[in-house]
Each structure stands twice: as C-alpha cells, then as structure tokens.
Image (cartoon, rainbow, N blue to C red):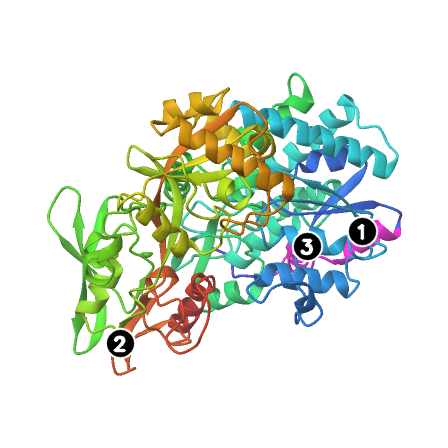
Amino acid sequence: MNTLKQLPELTALVEAGKNPFNQVLMNYVDQGGKTVGFMYQDTPEEIITAAGAAPIYLRGTTSEGTEMAEAFFRQLTCNYTKHTYNEILDGKWDFLDGAVLYNLCDHSRRIYDNWKTIPVNPAYHFMYVPKKRSELSKDFYREEINKLIKATEEHFGVEITKEKLAEAIKLHNETRRLQQEIYEMQKGEEVYLTGLELLMVMLAGVSLPRPEYNKMMKDLIAALKANGPRIKPKVRLLYTGGHADNPEFFELLQQNDAHVVSDNTGFGTRAADVLICEDGDPLEAIINYYFEEKPAATRQMGTQVERTPAFVKALKKVNADVRLNNRATELIQENGKIVGVKVQPKDGKPYLIRANDVILATGGYSAGKELLKQYTPEVLNLGTTNSAGTTGDGHIMAQKVGANLTRMKDLVLNPVTYNANGTHISFTAARFNSGGIMVNQEGKRFVDTTNNDKTGVTMAMLKASKGTGIAYLIFDQEPVSRLAILQDYVAKGYVVKDDTIPGLAKKLGIDPKGLEETVIKFRKYAKEGKDPEFGRKTFKCKLDQPPYYGVAVEPSVHATLGGIAINAKSQALDKNGNVITGLYAVGQVSNSELGRHGVNIFVPPSFAKIAVKDILSK
C-alpha cells in the first residue's frame, strides 16, 4: 500500500465538500450559471436540473454562530436550522437564483417561513412530502411534484419538457454510478479514501453543478486507481446519521486510526444505491424513485421493515461485525470501572464483550413494565406509541452498577391513540388540528379536545370513562380533506364512517341521541366562535360536512423523560455525583435535564458525538 499522499483530483472535491461556497461553484455562478438551494434528501433534484439550474444543498457548515438567527426561532430549534438560517441572514446564500424547501421536520421548515419574510429572497416553492406510503399519498405526492414543476417553470421562465427530464435523469444517474464505484473501492481491507475524504467527496455531489462534479469524479477515480489503495484502517466504521458535514468529527476519528469506509446518509449511499429508471415516462420515473424506490429515510413512517435489512446489508458490505437478536443483560464492572457487557443471544450461551468504555443508547422505558410499575404505576396498563424495544434495559443495568436514575416519574402522555391489535397509532393530528370533538360512551363532550395539556386531557378521559380511558374522536370530512395522515388512517380502516351522526354512533357503540344532541350544540358554538362549556378557541371542523368519522381512542405513554444522570461529557454519574468510569449514556436512557445542566429532552441524542469525542481523546 502506498504512503498516504494528497492527490490534486481529490483535494478539489474535499474542499467542495467542506465549503458550500467553494471556488468551482462560485466560478459557475460568475459565468452566469443558475443555482437553486434545496434540502436533502427528498427534493427531486432532477426537476431543478431540467430547468437549467444547479441544485445546491443548503447547509450552515461555515457558520460560526447563530446570533442573527436566534431572533427567528425558538430556543430548542436544532443547530442545523439555526446555523443555516444565520448564513442566509449573513448574505452568504445571496448568490442563489431560487430555493425549494419541504416538510423535512418542523424545525427546518421554518427556514422557508422566515426566509419569505425577507423582502428580496430566492425561496419560490414549498413542497409537502408524505411521511407514509400508500396509493392515496402517492396521488398526493404526484400533485406536489406537478406543483413544483409549475412553480419552477414560472420562476425561471422555462418549460420543463419530458426530454429535459430524461436528460436530467441520465446526468444524475451518471453521478450515482460514479459514487457507487467509489464505495466499491472502500470494501477491501485496504481502502482508497480516508473516512473524511469519502464523506466530503459525497457531500461535494450536492455542492457543485452536476456536470462539473461528474467530470471531477471521473478524474478522481482514474487517479485513485493509478495510485492504488492509500490506507489500511485499524478500525472500519459505517457512519449513519443526518447532517454529517462536520470535518472536525471525522478528523478526530482518523487521529485514532478509525475510518468511515461507508455510510447510511441522505447524500451518501441512500442517494447512490438506486438508479432512476431511464425507460418510459421520465416524470413517472422520478415520482416512483423519490416516493418508493429510493432507500427510505428514518422520517418515513412504516418503513422500518425495509430500513433494517437495508442497514444490515450495508454493514455486511463493509465486513462489519453484525449481531442481531443479541441482548445486553449486564454491565461488567471491575475495580470500579466498566469494562464490558454480558450478552445473551437469542439462541446459544451468554458471552462477554470486553471494551475500554461502554456507551448506553438503549432508549427510554415507555414499554418497560418493570420500571413503569416501580415509578409510575398509574400508567402501567397503558400502551405506548413508542418502540416495543423501549423496555428500560439500559436503566436497569446502569442502576445495578450504582448509576443515579433521576426524574423517573416524569413522562409524556399521548391522550388519543388507536389500539390496532397492540400497536398504538397516534391521532394527535385530529386532536390538535381542530379535528372535531371527543365524547364519552353517552355521546357527551367532557373536555376541550384541542387542549395542549396532555396529562389533563388524559385524566379527563379516565374520569369520563370510569377508569378505562376509552373515548371517541368525532370529526367530519373537513379535516380528512385537509390532513393526509387522516386520509391514510381512513384507508387503513382505523376509522368508522357514516353519512349521519346517529348512524355513526351506532357503529361506534355509543348513544345515538346523546351524540346527536352534542353535535347540534357544538355546531352552534362553532358558528358563534365561542365554546361556553370547555373554552375551545378553534373551529376548523364544524361537524357540518358529511360523511362523518369516528374512532375509539385511549391514552398511551409517548415518551419517558427520566434516566441516568450524566455530566457534560455524557459520563454516567452515581448518587454522589461521581463519574462511573467507563460508562456513558446518550439519548433517552439519560436524564433529559442532563443532571444539573438544565438541557431539554431534544438535546441528549447529540451527546453521542460528545461521548465519542471524550473516549477518543483519552
């Protein structure tokens, strides 16, 4: 293997990956090239390319602060959103000719909302991408794609023809084939790129005009093959995550001879693994690819069955040690230090995995009957909208070696879930989006359905149902027409439907006369815009647009907030506040307040990187 050396063909791509305002892109802009900022990974880039513009991934990589953006977002908004918008306010993205955003998450979508408040801005379209796959949602998605095409044509004054779409597909497929070739070169014991180089080369793909990127990739592959493998990693890693654009993190890994040889990111393998069909109607090919053929992302509901095998396949490609159905049962402690874990496989004898450090990332205990019985017995009989795997195993193991469990009585309830044979489906969309009313067995209202006090609503449900917690959400066609998630629930048969209120009541098994009287009264409140009984403020659903819908709902445990007390390095603490050497806790297995640090529940997952950095710095 050759001594690691810099290749000019590689340097240019790495620099483009590190810097979204790279020189190659700026030269393209100076020569009159059009650019459109977009958010990965569900924006159909081929449509932008077909309009004659270069799709460029919006990211706040070079941001050094969020001072300007803070005025536009809530305190808990993620750093990706705030840093990106800070760069927008700082004028760094002023070169863009357009920008397309979509409902990636509630945080990032606010970039579009705030961007539109600026008098001169490039944001010309917001696209809604369904979070679930069904025939109904695919039809909705097709409409959204057509809206995007129309908006793009109007914005740039061009016509996006089928011929241009076909050319764009071929161009982007060429990118995917070149990227696939790069990943193939990382499979051997000796690899051609360091982990940092690999991820930056991939990130360059969404930071450069595609023709230029493809040419640079061809030159790079030729140079790499001519020089041969450049490094033999001591530790081979597969990186999975979201915004993997921080070079410092990967440089830290490499200092310890640990290299990312593959990934599971939106701009990496998930973008390169599957080609768009080049036969037939190009528009349908794009719709099919982004809706159902492209490897699913974590924010697509109901895709775990698909994502898990894909992830295992990706691990096996790089010869990773994959152990499924192996349960950690005990932390091994020697002389006060955690030195490994005891593991029980599904079949076979238990064994030990020894390690210098152990990171617990086992989630909460929403489905953990042992811990719920101990700390919150009042919710023991409730189901959960969380994963069946959130059994609190990490909490129990840590407690046995002296870890301090704090806030264990604190949890988040979801009052309105449909029990689908043990799987609890959230109907929060109907409750929070003015989606009708909630009634008891007698057909009477007992609470403001839209009240944000989840515990209060749950207690009201328990009282109105004499302890069972069962109530009935009643709504009409208005929220169903408005909310794709309700359309999906109707299609799946979770919801009862009838043309009349009495008919609906009979199907639900509640008092028809009581429900009819309640609905008549509620229609009056909705018309007047005032609810003298429960103080409801919003009335989008007035229960006057048949057909009518109903569903039996019950409270569930949504998330637990308690966990292992940790310090700012994610190290587990005992009851005296001392570090338990060798043990780290990240995510919901840790206390959401991080001991005495007062940080909210949404922050702990980011402490995984902090834990890794601390371990590697030893």
Q: Is 28 part of what is drawn in magenta?
A: yes
N-terminal of the pair, mark 2 or mark 1, is 1
Residue 141, can we see it?
Answer: yes
Which percent across, then down, holds residue 491?
A: 47, 24
Q: Is 47 part of what is drawn in magenta?
A: no
Q: Residue at x 39, y 61 (%)?
A: 587
Query: Quick one: quadrant of the C terminus?
Result: bottom left
- Give the residue type at disc 3: Ile
Tell me the distance, in whole angstroms, between the alpha carbons under discs 1 and 3: 15 Å
| Residue at the disc numbered 3 | 111
Tell me the distance, in whole angstroms, between the alpha carbons under discs 2 and 1: 50 Å
In front: 290, or 313? 290
Residue 386 position (above or below residue 524): below
| Residue at the disc numbered 1 | 96
Extent of the magenta region: 5-30
Q: Kindly state the secondary structure of the residue where label 2 is placed.
A: strand
Q: Kindly state the secondary structure of the residue where label 1 is placed.
A: loop
